[in-house]
Image: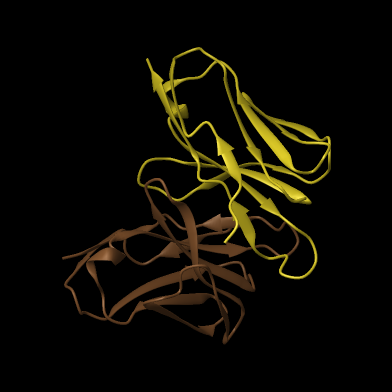
Chain colours: A brown, B yellow
Amino acid sequence: DVKVTQSSRYLVKRTGEKVFLECVQDMDHENMFWYRQDPGLGLRLIYFSYDVKMKEKGDIPEGYSVSREKKERFSLILESASTNQTSMYLCASRDRVFGGYTFGSGTRLTVV
Amino acid sequence: GQQLNQSPQSMFIQEGEDVSMNCTSSSIFNTWLWYKQDPGEGPVLLIALYKAGELTSNGRLTAQFGITRKDSFLNISASIPSDVGIYFCAGQRSGGSNYKLTFGKGTLLTVNP
């Protein structure tokens, strides 16, 4: 089975800190995605990467950046964390043939 | 970004009851997917549908790909407490940016034992 691993389940950071959320997949998938999930708003796409060093903005990229230096790893960066970035962050990778996503277990980030 | 219209937003049912939820869109999709998210976890794929009119089962779950390609439904029969969670539909187009899924906002299911 494909495994998508997010490095932290829970994080608490202070306002203004630079925050790194890491995601690793083990199935050589080209496409990877970062979403945030908030009650009543569903899953909102922040950034995605369709290959190494390639990235595109999603629907809500403001305040975030990403890095994809290796195929298996996709990092989400909060340049200067703010309280409105408190959320559940989900990473996913996509199988080219099947097309569906496999999600990680999520990182619940609290910015205080 | 576009989201699918998923209903109902939430359901509170008794154990043993059947459940039905659906997703509609103003545009056509070539693949429909249904995910379940347990509390505190990431979504997990339940059923994938690839053909208009397709009806697929996975245990007590049954999903259908609407013949117009603009809708899909998910049924759960004889619900049990572990069915609790958020159910998401997702659609995918082919061609162009075909690697992106469009998600519904989810249906929160609560099962009373």
Q: Is residue A2 above or below residue A47?
A: above
Query: Is residue A88 rendered to the left or right of residue B70?
Result: left
Quadrant that contains the C terminus of chain B: top left
Q: Is residue B105 above or below residue B102?
A: above
Determine which quarter of the picture holds residue A99: bottom right
* Residue A94 shows in the view: yes
Q: Residue at x 57, y 56 (%)?
A: A102
Q: Is residue A14 above or below residue B58?
A: below
Q: Position of residue B68 (x, y in %)?
A: 82, 40
Of residue B83 and residue B90, the one placed in the foreground of this image is B90
Query: Is residue A102 rendered to the left or right of residue B110?
Result: right
Query: Is residue B104 rendered to the left or right of residue A100?
Result: left
Quadrant that contains the N terminus of chain B: bottom right
Determine which quarter of the picture holds residue A53: bottom right
Q: Residue at x 59, y 84 (%)?
A: A52
Of residue A5 and residue A106, the one placed in the foreground of this image is A106
* Residue A108 shows in the view: no
Q: Position of residue A6 (x, y in %)?
A: 40, 64
Q: Position of residue A55 (x, y in %)?
A: 57, 81
How many numbered markers are drawn? 0
Q: Residue at x 72, y 39 (%)?
A: B71
Determine which quarter of the picture holds residue A89: bottom left
Query: Is residue A107 rendered to the left or right of residue A16?
Result: right
Which residue is situated farthest in the front direction here? Answer: B26
Q: Position of residue A45 (x, y in %)?
A: 51, 64
